[in-house]
Image (cartoon, rainbow, N blue to C red):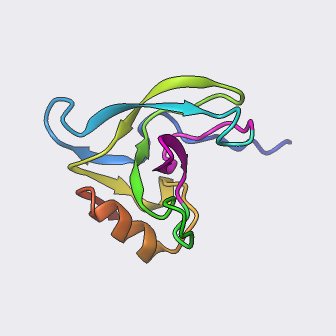
Amino acid sequence: MAILTEANRTAEFLQSEANGYRSRDVQVFDSTTNWAGAAIPAGQVYAIVGGAAVAFDGDAIDGSEVAAGILFEAVEAGGNVDRTVVVRDAEAKRYKLTADGTNSEVDAALLALGIIVRD
């Protein structure tokens, strides 16, 4: 029997957030240029470099080491769309986040936004 791997669902990373939509915002994601045409999963930690959303990289020195939020819902490969993001006052499940960096780098970058990462 084949093994199926299910991608993160919309907001599956979210443990809690502020009342209403205070934790959320909207961000443009262009997977054709800034993500090499790849799909972007829900739970992706991202940064803003040169006005564009790019993958968070805790080891970088180009601005992508400064987290801007977490992608709430996935972006299909080749998409250029507005997506909901979590940018403040929330708790996230570590094992549901996608980020390039150590746990301490991701934790510190998100904590600066008011997002606490839980195990």
* Residue beneath the point at 31% across and 45% down: 87
| Looking at the image, residue 59 lies above or below residue 15 | below
Q: Quadrant of residue 111?
A: bottom left
Part of the protein shown in magenta: 37-56
Q: Position of residue 31 (x, y in %)?
A: 65, 34
| Residue 80 visible within the image | yes
Q: Nearer the viewer, residue 16 or 60?
A: 60
Q: Quadrant of residue 92?
A: bottom left
| In this rendering, position of residue 99 left or right of residue 13 | right
| Looking at the image, residue 34 lies above or below residue 57 | above
Q: Does the magenta segment cover residue 39?
A: yes
| In this rendering, position of residue 9 left or right of residue 38 | left
- The quadrant of the image that shows the N terminus is top right
Q: Position of residue 50 (x, y in %)?
A: 51, 46
- The quadrant of the image that shows the C terminus is bottom left
* Residue beneath the point at 33% across and 64% down: 118
Q: Does the magenta segment cover residue 21?
A: no
* Residue beneath the point at 45% across and 28% down: 83
Q: Position of residue 109 (x, y in %)?
A: 37, 65
